[in-house]
Image (cartoon, helix red, strand yellow):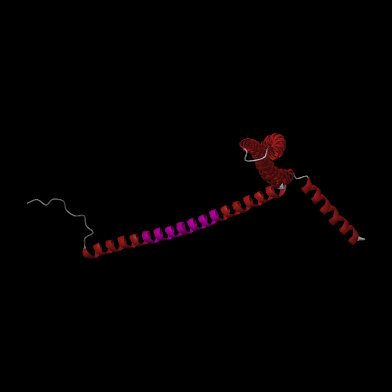
Amino acid sequence: MNIFKRIFKIGQAETHSAIDQLENPIKMSEQGIRDMKEDLDKSLRALAEVKAMAIRARNDVENYREKAQEYENKAVQLLQRAHKGDLSTTEADRLAGEALLRKEENIKLSAQALQDQHKFEGSVAQLDQNIKQLKSTISKWENELKTLKSRVTVSNATKTINKQLAQIDSHSTVALLERMKEKVAVEEALAESYGEIANESKTIDQEIDKALQTSAASKASEDVAALKAKLGLTTTPVEGRQE
């Protein structure tokens, strides 16, 4: 039973993690920007293709117009040759008619190509506008994402610090400080005790030395007095003998 509970807990944790990742605004924004950039690439390719079709249509317009003019010129030349007698009138009229038919076909083709050109150029203008808008949106989202990342960094740092501060046990901290204060007081008292012992030792030594010095001085005085007595110098000396 406990195994099933553990499996359920693990699955529940993974589900919450997946939900958190789905709800992560930074990841969602990054994915949104990636999607827009893919759309931008597709739009740029489409723009290039439509521009190519517009260019081709424009070239077709010119080509069909030139061909129509060429067929008209050929019809004129055929009629002129028939007029000179170089070609029969019947053959010249038939061929000139065919040339004029080709001319009309090319004029129609030129008109259709012109319509296609205008249509493609309109699509190019629309695509270009959409691409500019998409680029502006991507730039805006990227700037907002930078701001969002900065805000998340600051909020995470603040949350971490506040969490650490909130987890501090004030009672244990106070007890630790009290123990430190007590230990410091003991060390200070011990240091003062050693100082007093050292001072006491110095004082006793000084008293001993002083006592010894006093005894030595007394003995020296007694020795001097004994020597004076031996020499008969104990009498008071006469001050100023008169001639």
Q: Which residues are magenta?
A: 191-213
Dominant secondary-structure state across the stretch colored magenta: helix
Is 210 colored magenta in this rendering? yes
Note whether 102 is above or below 236 in the view shown: above
127 or 59: nearer the viewer: 59
In the rendered image, the quadrant that contains the N terminus is bottom right
Mark yes or no: residue 192 visible. yes
Q: Is residue 107 left or right of residue 196?
A: right
Left/right placement of residue 14 relative to residue 227 reads right
In this picture, is 222 found above or below 34?
below
User: Closest to the observer: 196 or 65?
Assistant: 65
Foreground pick, 43 / 31 = 43
State the residue at coordinates (81%, 48%): 19
Can residue 165 be seen by looking at this rendering?
Answer: no
**Quarter of the figure with residue 133:** top right
Residue at the farthest left position:
243
What residue is shown at x 54% (from left), y 55% (from top)?
191
Whether residue 1 sits left or right of residue 195 in the image: it is: right
Quadrant of residue 91 in the image?
Answer: top right
In the rendered image, which quarter is residue 120 located in? top right
